[in-house]
Image (tube, helix red, strand yellow):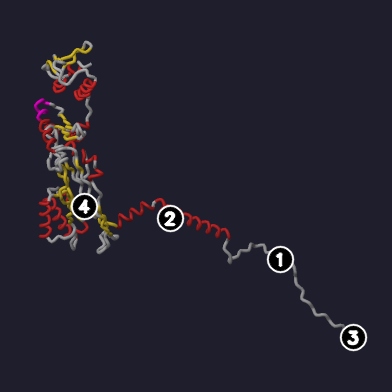
Amino acid sequence: MENKKRKKPKTKKYNHKVIKIKNGFESRNFVYTGKLKALLIVTIFIFVILVVRIGFVQFVQGNFLKEKAYQQQTINQIISPKRGNIYDATGKALAIGAQVDTITINPTKLVKSNETDTKDYKEKIARKLSEIFSLDYEDTLNKVSSEAQVETIIKKVEQEKVDVLKQWMEENKISVGINIDEDTKRYYPYSTVASSVIGFCGNDNQGLSGIEAKWESVLTGTPGKIVSSKGSDQQEIPNAEETYISAENGSDLTLSIDLNIQSIVEKYLKQAVDENECSRGGNVIAMNPKTGDILAMASYPDYDLNNPFTPNSALAPTYDALSSEDKSKALSKMWINKSVGETYEPGSTFKLITAAVALEENITSTDKAGDFYCQGYEDVSGINISCWTKTPHGVQTLRRSLCNSCNPAFMQLR
């Protein structure tokens, strides 16, 4: 048997030749790295802007926005404190606080079922308010028709007019929208007495001149308030919790001025000014020589403390012809306390010092007869200086020279 060689199995031949594809290959399964970076940068940028904005709102605008939110969400009703009284040395009241009322309205609460009825209702209220308190109707109607939460109609109203308003509100069954709030008004029982010293207050009970202005921090006290909440519609939230902060009344002041002495001094000051035709007025200070207390300080012309913006008798004849600016200046001059608000040459007041020095140096004595002679003038280095009076005083003692305020006598002490 013929030996046959076992055939080897045929092996598959592979073509290992690499074929290069000339066309570009694009994959749709991946996001470009460039786009991812751009998206990341934009995201970080927006995040940084948000952080900066939040920081600005929190730290820069925080207090302002907090205050704004408080104003939008709360209603503050101010409670006026009672201003302290001013007394003279004997306990008589020179300035007191009288009880009055302030009338305010809530325009948004003055409504009816439809727009026409609401308009008529507001016109009716405006007409009555202007009638009771002698106000301009158009101005009152504008306040009644406004969108404000609160409008002030009139301040410092006397009880008689308030009673008329209350009766009208009761007759027309008006229970909301018109408010009557307690207030105080400054009142001066003695009108013109010590006017330049005491001074006066404005409509808000703030001192504008004199003691009233100088001691404002002591007299005024600290206002109180009632704090309640309101919603986004700016209406008060019913049954919301209220915070009540009571007012602290001002302190009283007692002056060294004696009302009796002050009245006497003012009487004779007026008489002296009128008799001597002193166009610039005059002023007097009465002092206790042992303690230095001021017992009286008077200026003339004076003015009415209860009507301080009304010109006095000296200013009234020319007041209406003045411009607005000149009127303000004239009133300021009328209010001034001449004793402390104007400057003067020492003049005759310095004669007290001259007399005291003469006595201390034994140049003369109080009642040495014929020690001085006034002929109506005195020659000083070739210049004749006249006495203040046209009639010479003649022979005088130091006491009499001081009583006469004699210029030549005191020049003779040189």
- Foreground mark, 3 or 2? 2
**Which label's residue is closer to the chain start, 4 or 3?**
3
Q: Would you name the residue on which mark 3 appears? A: 3
Q: Which residues are magenta?
A: 271-277
Residue furthest to the right: 1
On screen, residue 280 versus residue 6, left or right, reads left
Q: Would you name the residue on which mark 1 appears? A: 19
Q: Height in image: 333 above or below 138? A: above
Q: Are marks 3 and 2 in contact (CB under 8 Å)?
A: no
The residue lying at 21 percent from left, 34 percent from top is 291
Q: Is residue 31 visible?
A: yes
Tell me which amino acid carries mark 1. Answer: Ile
Q: Would you name the residue on which mark 4 appears? A: 151
Mark 4 element type: strand
Tell me which amino acid carries mark 3. Answer: Asn
Tell me which amino acid carries mark 4. Answer: Glu
What is the magenta segment's predominant secondary structure?
helix
Circle 3 packing at 10 Å, graded few (<14), some (14-19), many (20+), is few
The residue lying at 19 percent from left, 18 percent from top is 364
Mark 3 element type: loop
Q: CA distance from mark 4 to mark 3?
A: 133 Å
Q: CA distance from mark 2 to mark 1?
A: 61 Å
Q: Are marks 1 and 4 in contact (CB under 8 Å)?
A: no
Quadrant of the rendered image containing residue 200? top left
Percent coordinates x, y for residue 40 in the rendering: 53, 58
Q: Would you name the residue on which mark 2 appears? A: 54
**Which label's residue is closer to the chain start, 1 or 3?**
3
Assign the N terminus to one quadrant of the image.
bottom right
